[in-house]
Each structure stands twice: as C-alpha cells, then as structure tokens.
Image: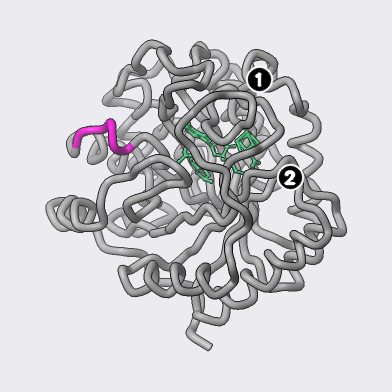
Amino acid sequence: MQMAVAGDVRTDWTLDEVRSLFELPFNDLLFAAQNAHRRHFDPNAVQISTLLSVKTGGCPEDCSYCPQSIRYETDVNNDPLMELREVVEQARAAKAKGATRFCMGAAWRSPKPKQLEQINAMVAAVSNLGMETCATLGMLKPEQAQQLKAAGLDYYNHNLDTSERHYQKIITTRTYKHRLDTLEAVRDAGLKVCCGGIVGMGEDELDRAELLHTLATMAEHPGSVPINQLVQVEGTPLAGEDAFDPLDFVRMIAVARILMPASHVRLSAGREDMSDEMQALCFLAGANSIFYGEKLLTTSNPSADKDRQLMSRLGITPEACSKQSA
Ligand code: SAM
Ligand code: DTB
Ligand code: SF4
C-alpha cells in the first residue's frame, strides 16, 4: 500500500486502502501513524482549544447523541445567547490558562441574521485578544460563511459525525448532503474547516472507515479533525450504548493521522472516560490537539490542572499560537 510521504498529502485514498489500515496489526498501525505524524509535526506539541457554549439547549434538531436537543429530556438548561462581555471574559480566562483557540458553540439548526451579527461581534472581540477563533453554529449558507470570515473567524466546526449510511440512524432533521453543503460554503469563504465525527454510536468498523474516507477524499483535508468518543448523556436515545473498545478508539486516531497527515487530529469529547495511558496512546497514534478546560459544551472535561499534569508526565508542550495579540 502507498503511504503518505512528506509533501505528499493524498486526497485519492480508496475505501479499500482505508479498510486495510484498520486491519493492520496494532503495532504496525501505530508505527505508520507515528511516522506520518513526525513527517509533518513536532511530535511533542499539542494544540489547545477551549470551548464555550454561547447558546445552550432548546435545539430543534434530533441528533440522538445530543443533550441540547429539545426532543430529549436531559438536565441541560435552555440559556439564551450570552452577552458579548461575558464571552470575552471567558475567552480571556481561557487564554490565561494556556488555550490558543477559542471555539464558540451554539445549539441552533442554523443562525438567524440577527444572531449571526451578535456572533460576528464575539468573533471580532475574541480575535482581538490574539486568539484563534472557531465557531460551530449549525448549517451555514455561503453568504453567512462569508460574513463570519469578514468578522475575523479562523475555523468553522461542522462534523459529519459518522458514515452516510449510519447517519440516518442518528439524525433525521438534516441530511448528510446538508452537512457537505455547509462544509463547501465554509471552505469557499476561505475559512479553515474543522470536521470530524463521533465513535461509539453503535456504528461498525466499516462506518468508521467510510467516515474517514469521506474526510480524507475531500478536495482539501479539513485543517482540524475532531474525533469524539460519544459522551453518553441520560435522556438521549444513545444513552446506554455499549462501551467502546479503547483500542479501537486509538485505531481511529491512527488511521485519521495516516490519511490526513498534515491536519490536526483532535482527541475531543470523551476524555473524562479515558485513562492517562489511553490518552498517551492516542498522542502516540498522532492526536495533536485537545479541548482544554473543565467543560466541553454542556458536559465535563478533565480539569486544566489534570491536563497540565498529564502533559508534563508525557513531556508534551502546548503548540504556539498562530496569532499575535492586538
Ligand atoms: N448545533 C451545531 C451543530 O450541531 O452543528 C453546533 C454544536 S454541536 C453540539 C457540535 C458537535 O458536537 C456535534 O456535531 C457532535 O459531533 C458533537 N457532540 C454533541 N454531543 C456529543 C456527545 N454527547 N458526545 C460526543 N460528541 C458530541
Ligand atoms: C467537536 O467535534 N466536539 C465538540 C466541538 N466539536 C463543538 C463538542 C463536544 C460536545 C460534547 C457534549 C457536550 O458537552 O454537550
Ligand atoms: Fe442541535 Fe447541534 Fe445538538 Fe444537533 S448537535 S441537537 S444541531 S446542538
């Protein structure tokens, strides 16, 4: 099988090639992933993002993993869009703790014009702090993506979540095509794409291979690829799924690293359920980004202290920020 070499980022992977990577003996897979990683990145640097839910709960969509859907009874409160001042305060605090990217999430199907204006003001203010900005607001039309770009947004997160065939079992209120259209609008507006998925939603290995194949055969690889492990939240339809095999999670990271060697692969949701040793294996498999801070959007994440200790034990240092303070 042809492997990626430095300067050779392939977008022509076949599904068979992706499936063969999943079939490799674990040690061979990790060796190949670590090689790909070292060709493109400092192997001991990890990019650090902090999330903030700027508008929480009450979402009309039916994503069966999500505690923010109005259709499921969960402990999540419905909060209106946060004030600009509060968002800037939180971004400043995240920066002081060492985050270089601030990602604002909103529980919307897609933003309305007035809402987008308010988000644009947040993006401009956070960008002025000298942080990279990311937003995840649901579906976007081309002109909305262009407005966000003009406001100073760096990344837009919009996940494919799973394979096209498994997707229909997870979400019915928007299609895979809707997601691909939003991603195209984002890319065409000159925003960097953050796109990945979730494992542990009852999918099989072929679904995971198909998801990574779709990502790795996009015209341009997403700059960031978040790999989330399902956080099971009581009240959502996916609560009670079988626990996911930790080694299969590491495999997913390794295959993503090999297929998209120059992208940041983010070890995303689910770290609270992972041992330090499992996270170390994920870094060895090529993960080089994390969400940092006590909270993801509505669920908990390891404390900043705990993560600092882990990074220190592993000799991992935070990746430098690409932006300067204004
Ligand atoms: N509402 C917007 C949307 O869905 O496009 C943006 C926010 S949404 C919460 C962002 C992503 O978070 C989802 O696409 C999904 O991949 C991830 N996510 C949500 N709930 C999760 C859970 N319980 N476990 C793991 N990932 C989750
Ligand atoms: C992504 O891939 N994972 C993040 C971020 N992008 C927006 C969200 C994880 C959410 C986990 C469940 C919660 O905290 O509500
Ligand atoms: Fe809404 Fe996003 Fe949650 Fe789906 S994942 S229910 S769109 S907040």
Q: Residue at x 37, y 71 (%)?
A: 93
Residue position marked by numbered label 1 in the rendering: 167
Q: Residue at x 74, y 28 (%)?
A: 176
Label located before the other in sequence (2 or 1): 1
Q: Residue furthest left?
A: 313
Secondary structure of the magenta portion, mostly? helix
Residue type indicated by callout 1:
Tyr
Image quarter of residue 245:
top left
Task: Please tell me which residue is depicted at 81% across the width and 53% down the height of the picture.
Answer: 112
Ligand 3 - quadrant of the structure image: top right
> Image quarter for residue 97?
bottom left
Q: Residue at x 50, y 79 (%)?
A: 130
Q: Is residue 216 left or right of residue 110?
A: left
Can residue 106 be found in the magenta stretch?
no
Q: Which mark is residue 98?
A: none
- Residue 28: x and y, percent? 31, 26
The x and y percentages for residue 47 are 39, 59
Q: Residues within 10 Å of mark 2 (few under 14, many from 20)?
A: many
Residue at image mark 2: 183
Cα gap from disc 2 to disc 1, whole angstroms: 16 Å
The span picked out in magenta is: 271-275
319 vs 17, left or right, is left
